[in-house]
Structure formats: structure tokens, C-alpha cells
Amino acid sequence: MFDATKERARLTKQAAKLQEEIELLNVRLSSEGFVRQAKPQFVDQTRKALRDKEERLAAITKSIAELE
């Protein structure tokens, strides 16, 4: 049996964790020193990680809205 309340709580927790990770990546990428001194490959990996997490957060947010 599907428990919407538990699923909503699980997704909300997941969304909060992703939001924290997104904020950390944004801080890193907004640092001129990081972007200038890090290897371009690492900066690209960080940008990709940010995009992936933002996409996952959007999907989770949509799922939460559908449960309401």
C-alpha cells in the first residue's frame, strides 16, 4: 500500500539535501579563485554536477507537488 505522507516526507528530505549540495556548488563556482586556479576539467565536472542536481531537484519538487 502506498503511503503518500511517508513518500512526501522522504522526497522533502531528499530535496533539502539536494538544495544544500546545490548551494555548496554555487558557492564554489562563484569563487573567482576556484574557477581561475582549478583545472578546467574539474570546473566542468563541478558545473555538470550542479546541473544534474538541479535537474534532480526539479523532478523531486514536481513529484512532491503531484502528491498534494
Image: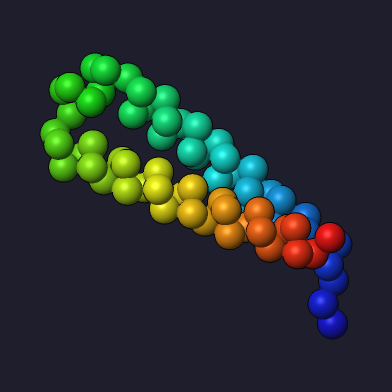
- The residue sitting at 75% across, 58% down in the picture is 65
Residue 32 at what x, y percent from top left? 26, 17
**Is residue 65 among what the camera can see?**
yes
**Would you place residue 63 above or below residue 29 in this image?**
below
- Specify the quadrant that holds the N terminus: bottom right
Q: Is residue 17 left or right of residue 33?
A: right
Say how many tags the image has: 0
Q: Residue at x 42, y 25 (%)?
A: 27
The residue at 50%/32% (across/down) is: 23
Direction from residue 42 to residue 12 in the image, left or right: right
Report whether residue 10 is seen.
Answer: no
* In the image, residue 59 above or below residue 47: below
Horizontally, residue 30 falls left or right of residue 15, namely left
- Residue at left 17%, top 22%? 36
Question: Which of the pair 62/26 is nearer the observer?
Answer: 62
Nearer to the camera, 11 or 63:
63
Residue extending furthest bottom? Answer: 1
On-image quarter of the C terminus = bottom right
Q: Is residue 18 above or below residue 56?
A: above
Residue 5 image offset from top left, x and y in percent: 85, 62
